[in-house]
Every structure is written in C-alpha cells, then in structure tokens.
Amino acid sequence: SKVISSSKERETATLIRSLHVMKELSSDEEFLWQPEATFDFTETVKHSIQGYCWLFPLIVGKRHFVNLGIVDLDVIHRSRFSLLPAFTEFLARKGIKEAKIEGYPSRIFDSNSIFSDNRILFVGDVAGIDGLWGEGISYSLGYGNVAALEIRDALETNDFSFSHYKYRLLNHELGQKLQRKLLTAQKLYSFPTGDINIWRHIVAILAPNGCC
C-alpha cells in the first residue's frame, strides 16, 4: 500500500534512542530530590554518545519521585554505542543502586522526511521531535495547529491528498524552529570525539541566544 511505501521511505530518518528510570525516593534517597531539572553531559561525552543524561524531579501527591534518563540523538551519523554502560555509571554517580530501566525510540525532525500521504497527516513524534534536546510534547501541540489548517483547507476544497502539508509545515514557525534546533545539534556534536575543549564548545553553543 502507499502508506507502507511511505513508511519505508521514512526509515532513513534519525532514530533517537533513550533509556530512563522512574523512581520513588526512599528516606535515604531524599537528597536526590531538588526543585530543578538537571542536564548532564559527563557520561555521554566520556562514552562518545551524542546526547545527555537527565534528572527531573516530580511530586505525586506528597511523594517525591525522580525521572533519570539518557538519550542518544545521533545527529552526526557515527558509530553508535550501547547506552547501558554510560547510564549505569550515571545512576551509580547519583546513588541509584536498584532501578527498573526502560527504553523507547523516537524520530528527529528532518526536513527531508515524508510528512503526509493521501488522507494521512503525520504529527508529533511520528513527524519528528526536537533534534537538540529530544523534546516532543510542546512541539506535538504545535503540529496540531499546522495540521488543523491543512484539514480545514482539505474540507473546503474536498482535496485530501494533503500534498501541501510539507510546504506549510516547513515554512511555519514550528518547522523553522525544529530545523534550527537540528542545525544547532549538528554543530554541537560535530566536534571530534575526545576533544579536550568539549565543555567549552557545549557552553558556547548552548549559551543564551545560541541554543535555538
């Protein structure tokens, strides 16, 4: 079918890999809970992974949780390494001894991807998420706005080929921002593995007005 054909064409898009842990904190682990998100490049730089580790605090009722994870964005296509050794080191450094590790894939937004087919629109994670941070929720809402305009036009013209959706998306503020994010990520991870100045590069590129 045409849908299967389109899906096969999309297989060239960059696949994001990630692992994460959701953990309720015991009294002995309360030191981990801080009211701020942490993005940590220590283990990913060490293991030549194009991404970062994170620690996000959560409150459910009155209970404290943390979400810890690692993501490989692979925006510069090099050899890919297992995420588990780096993530295990990160968890150990944070004092997490036992945890259930889960993983899931996603796709990076790429202007060369296919975004529609006859009577089908791709939005959210299927269309592609932020290539710099791997963030998708806010962008999914933005996709909805663009898709709504395309559907409105389809209803008015009775043309559900959605052949103009890609043009509309790439020229919309959402598409423009996602393209800038990908270019920034490619610049960030273009430095040679083991570059002793990697932290200087990270700070310079992700500094205010340089991360978008």
Image (cartoon, rainbow, N blue to C red):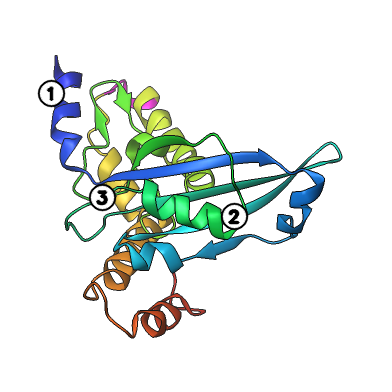
Question: What number is the disc on residue 110?
Answer: 3
Q: Mark 2 against mark 1, which lies toward the viewer?
A: 2
Query: From which residue to which does the magenta span run?
Result: 156-160
For the residues labelled 3 and 2, the Cα–Cα distance comes to: 27 Å
Among numbered discs 2 and 1, the one appearing first in the sequence: 1
- Quadrant of the rendering where the C terminus is positioned: bottom left
Viewer-nearest residue: 188 or 136: 188
Q: Position of residue 108 (x, y in %)?
A: 32, 48
For the residues labelled 2 and 1, the Cα–Cα distance comes to: 39 Å
Viewer-nearest residue: 20 or 152: 20
Viewer-nearest residue: 76 or 4: 76
For the residues labelled 3 and 1, the Cα–Cα distance comes to: 18 Å
**Circle 2 is placed at which residue position?**
55
Q: Is 68 positioned to the left or the right of 183 in the image? A: right
* Amino acid type of the residue that numbered disc 1 sits on in the rendered structure: Ser
Q: Is residue 134 visible?
A: no
Q: Residue at x 34, y 85 (%)?
A: 197
